Amino acid sequence: MTALPALEHDTLYEQLCKLPENMTGEIINGQLHSQPRPSARHGLAGGALSIDIGGPFQFGRNGPGGWWIIPEPEVHFVRDTEVAVPELAGWRRERMPQVPDEHRFEVVPDWVCEILSPSMRARIASSSCLSTPVTASPTPGWSIRRAHAGSLRTEPGSLDADRVAAG
């Protein structure tokens, strides 16, 4: 009997890298989750949050400064194995003195923010997606729900449940 050569399959990270440009993905609990790029409203809301948070925390305008606030970073909790892309993430500069040259972030963020579109909320409700590295980690963060009208509301359990950002 002749042994057949082992079939080579792409790793999950290789599959993630091969997603078409109009798709984005994450590797959560050993599964590749892909979805279309966010809508324009979603992007507008994320941009507004980045400006609101970046001014005081990254640039020290009417705030403490000392942070890197980065939109859609590819955070590798375990290199190429557990990969999440939160809407925004923040690192204290004393923990991450420089931003990496490549797209991978292997230092776990000190803070994350995820904007939950209606379709993302439905996907989370129908899967075990809530146990992502971001939500399972000790990293504090905000979970913000984008309403149909385009406004943003924080979800219960977020750091600042009174914060409302308009998008």
Image (cartoon, rainbow, N blue to C red):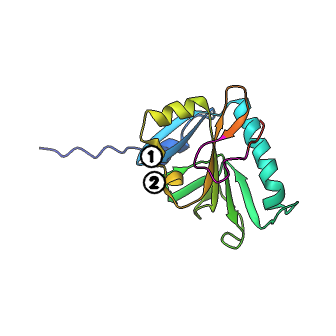
Which mark, residue 81? 2
Q: Residue at x 73, y 42 (%)?
A: 46
Q: Earlier in the sequence, mark 1 or mark 2?
A: 1
Q: Magenta stretch: give its range.
A: 154-163
Main secondary structure along the magenta-highlighted residues: loop
- According to the image, label 1 marks what residue? 12
Disc 2 residue type (three-letter): Thr
Question: Is residue 130 depicted above or below 80 in this figure?
Answer: above
Q: Is residue 155 magenta?
A: yes
Disc 1 residue type (three-letter): Leu
Per the image, label 1 sits on a secondary structure element best described as helix
- Residues under numbered marks 1 and 2 in contact, where contact means CB atoms less than 8 Å apart: yes
Question: Is residue 61 depicted above or below 158 in this figure?
Answer: below
Q: Is residue 43 magenta?
A: no
Which image quadrant: the C terminus? top right
Q: Position of residue 125 (x, y in %)?
A: 47, 34
Residue 37 falls in which quadrant of the image? top right
Per the image, label 2 sits on a secondary structure element best described as loop
Residue 56 falls in which quadrant of the image? bottom right
Q: Residue at x 68, y 63 (%)?
A: 91
